Structure formats: structure tokens, C-alpha cells
Amino acid sequence: MESGRCAAAAREVLPVANHRDLQARAQILRPTEGRYVATRITAGQKWRHHVSVTVEQHFVDALTGADGTEASRYLEQHFQHPDAVAWDDTDLKDDGL
């Protein structure tokens, strides 16, 4: 997966997610240590952040596919250093996403 595609995927997923769960929202994952978030499937690629949609206690994004991953397992399953990242809400309007 190329860098930058996660925000585009979240923009597509969020309207669908809002039909299913009015609390669905886009979130951005940023490193709390170092400069990059390290995913398990994109070794060698450097991402300054990652964007996902939370819906019904799941994260749905370009890493998880349409089925999503349970929120309780998401970081551990998809990231090499799950303790070195933090979530913030995002409105997906930031041009840098």
C-alpha cells in the first residue's frame, strides 16, 4: 500500500460507516516515539501517520479491508510498535492527509 492512500480510503469508508453507526469517526495515528509509524505489512515504507475509521468497536481502513479489525486487537495486529503510537480525531479535511 502506498503512503497517502489511507486518508483516501477513510474518506470513502466514513460515509458508509456513518449509515451503520452514528458515532463512526475518522482517526489519525501518529508516532509518540520516533518519526514514523511502523506497520507489520509495509516493512521498509515510512509513514508519518496512518488514518482509519472507527465503527462499531472496529477499525476499518486500507490495512484491514472491509471487514475491519476489532479495536482491542487493531494496534497489536497491524503495527510493529503499538505502544509508540497515539490516536487523535481528524476531520479528513487536512490537505496533508
Image (spheres, helix red, strand yellow):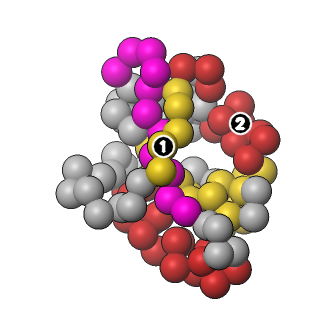
**Residue at screen point 64% across, 68% down:** 23
Tell me which segment is drawn in magenta. 25-35
Q: Residue at x 29, y 63 (%)?
A: 93
Residue 69: x, y in percent?
Answer: 73, 52
Q: Name the residue: 47% across, 50% down.
A: 89
Which residue carries the number 1 mark?
88
When the figure is inspected, residue 14 is found, relative to residue 37, above or below; the finding is below
Pointer 2: what residue?
77
* 3D distance between C-alphas at marks 1 and 2: 19 Å
The location of residue 92, given as percent across then percent down, is: 36, 61
Q: Nearer the viewer, residue 22 or 80?
A: 22
Q: Is residue 15 found left or right of 1 in the rendered image?
A: right
In terms of secondary structure, where does tag 1 sit? strand
Kindly identify the amino acid type of the residue bearing the numbered disc 1: Asp
- Where residue 18 sits in the image (x, y, percent)? 60, 77
The quadrant in which residue 84 appears is top right
Secondary element at image label 2? helix
Front label number (1 vs 2): 1
Identify the amino acid type marked 2. Gln
Tell whether 77 sits left or right of 1: right
User: Is residue 32 shown above or below 63?
Assistant: above
Mark earlier in primary sequence (1, 2): 2
Residue with the most extreme left position: 95
Identify the main secondary structure in magenta.
strand
| Residue at the outermost top position | 34
Dot 1 and dot 2 residues touching (CB under 8 Å): no
- The answer to whether residue 45 of the structure is visible from this angle is no
In this orientation, which residue lies closer to the viewer: 31 or 1? Answer: 31
Q: Badge 1 local density, few (<14 within 10 Å), some, or many (20+)?
A: few
